[in-house]
Image (cartoon, rainbow, N blue to C red):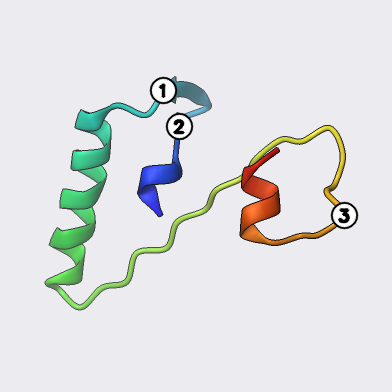
Amino acid sequence: MLKRISRVVDNDNVTPMSDDTREAILAQNKGLAVQALRVLGMAYKVVAELPATIDSDSVEMI
């Protein structure tokens, strides 16, 4: 779901996700995948309050 990402945190610096950054991440992922290595990612979103229903659709709409 890399297409949903709008910002990147790198060494405590938050920057907008650019097409170049997205392509670099995907290339790195592919390079590791051909070595049979798995890539794990983590995403978070800061919200003022929890939605009534916790699922992808309701959380993404906040």
Q: Residue at x 12, y 71 (%)?
A: 34
> Residue 62: x and y, percent?
70, 38
Quadrant showing the N terminus: bottom left
Amino acid type, callout 2: Ser
Per the image, label 3 sits on a secondary structure element best described as: loop
Query: Hey, which quadrant is residue 5 in on the image?
Result: top left
Question: N-terminal of the two: label 3 or label 2?
Answer: 2
Per the image, label 2 sits on a secondary structure element best described as: loop
Q: Nearer the viewer, mark 3 or mark 2?
A: 3
Q: From the viewer's perspective, is residue 12 above or below residue 3?
A: above
Amino acid type, callout 1: Pro
Q: Are marks 2 and 1 in contact (CB under 8 Å)?
A: yes
Residue closest to the eye, 11 or 50? 50
In the rendered image, which residue does mark 2 sit on? Answer: 6
> How many angstroms separate mark 1 from mark 3 (CA)?
29 Å
> Residue 33: x and y, percent?
19, 69
Q: Residue at x 16, y 61 (%)?
A: 30
In the rendered image, which residue does mark 1 sit on? Answer: 16
Question: N-terminal of the two: label 1 or label 3?
Answer: 1
In the rendered image, which residue does mark 3 sit on? Answer: 52
Q: Residue at x 55, y 48 (%)?
A: 43
Question: N-terminal of the two: label 2 or label 1?
Answer: 2
Q: Nearer the viewer, mark 1 or mark 3?
A: 3
Q: Are marks 3 and 2 in contact (CB under 8 Å)?
A: no
> How many angstroms separate mark 3 from mark 2 (CA)?
24 Å
> How many angstroms separate mark 2 from mark 1 (CA)?
6 Å
Query: Hey, which quadrant is residue 32 in on the image?
Result: bottom left
